[in-house]
Amino acid sequence: MLNRTVLVGRLTRDPDLRYTPNGKAVANFNIAVNRPFKDQNGENQADFINGVAWNKQAESLANYMKKGSQIGVDGRLQSRTYEGQDGKTVYVTEVVADSIQFLETKNQTNQQQNQSYQQQQYNQQPNQQYNQQSHNQQQINAANQEINRQADPFQNQGGPIDISSDDLPF
């Protein structure tokens, strides 16, 4: 039998690091994983999946990743039950992480949050910022085309190549 789960998503909150009475580190986390299709309104849907990491991996996750960070989780699904404070049985299904990959640094997460803030500001002032952003994008596109043109050794598309005999290896 095989119980393997691989997920890529963003943390929906900061990981919750705790220690067992034996001194083992355990971190609980939740990630949002986009579904590969859009709903009837054309919007992306996501699943919110609970996870748990142990030992050094738990400490690293809590120390280096925070809400919004993109991570990859390789692990297994686990179901468990416990009795809640109200006396009812609570059923929990979570991913127990065997391996967690940090898919971006703290700086990238901060940049992403700044871009999100800038996007909100852009939505509040669409005309002025749209024109500036459009102009900036045109400049970036023109620069990229020039770089690609200069770096493309096959830009002649089969025409004669200007090369000196000193450049030949034989």
Image: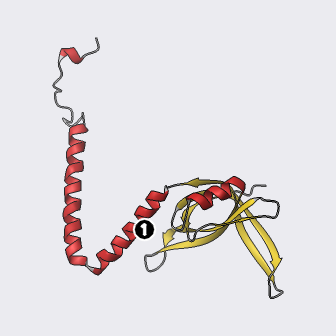
Q: Residues within 10 Å of mark 1 (few under 14, many from 20)?
A: some
Quadrant in the rendering for residue 48: bottom right
Q: Taking 79 as reference, is 128 left or right?
A: left
Residue 32: percent from left, percent from top: 56, 69
- Residue that mark 1 sits on: 113
Q: Secondary structure at mark 1?
A: helix
Looking at the picture, does residue 6 appear above or below residue 80?
above
Asked whether residue 7 is in view, the answer is: no
Residue 112 location, x and y as percent? 42, 64
Residue sitting at 46 percent across and 62 percent down? 109
The extreme bottom residue here reads 86
Q: Quadrant of the C terminus?
A: top left
98 is higher (above) or lower (below) than 127: above
User: How is this picture coloured?
Assistant: secondary structure
Which residue is at a point 56% across and 61% down the rendered structure image? Answer: 65
Amino acid type of the residue that numbered disc 1 sits on in the rendered structure: Gln
Residue 64 percent location from the top left of the image = 56, 58
Q: Position of residue 28 (x, y in %)?
A: 67, 67
For the residue pair 150 and 105, the one nearer the viewer reads as 105
In the image, 28 versus 158, the foreground residue is: 28
**Residue 146 occupies quadrant:** top left
**Residue under the point 42% across and 68% down:** 113
The residue sitting at 40% across, 62% down in the picture is: 111
- Specify the quadrant of the image occupied by residue 78: bottom right
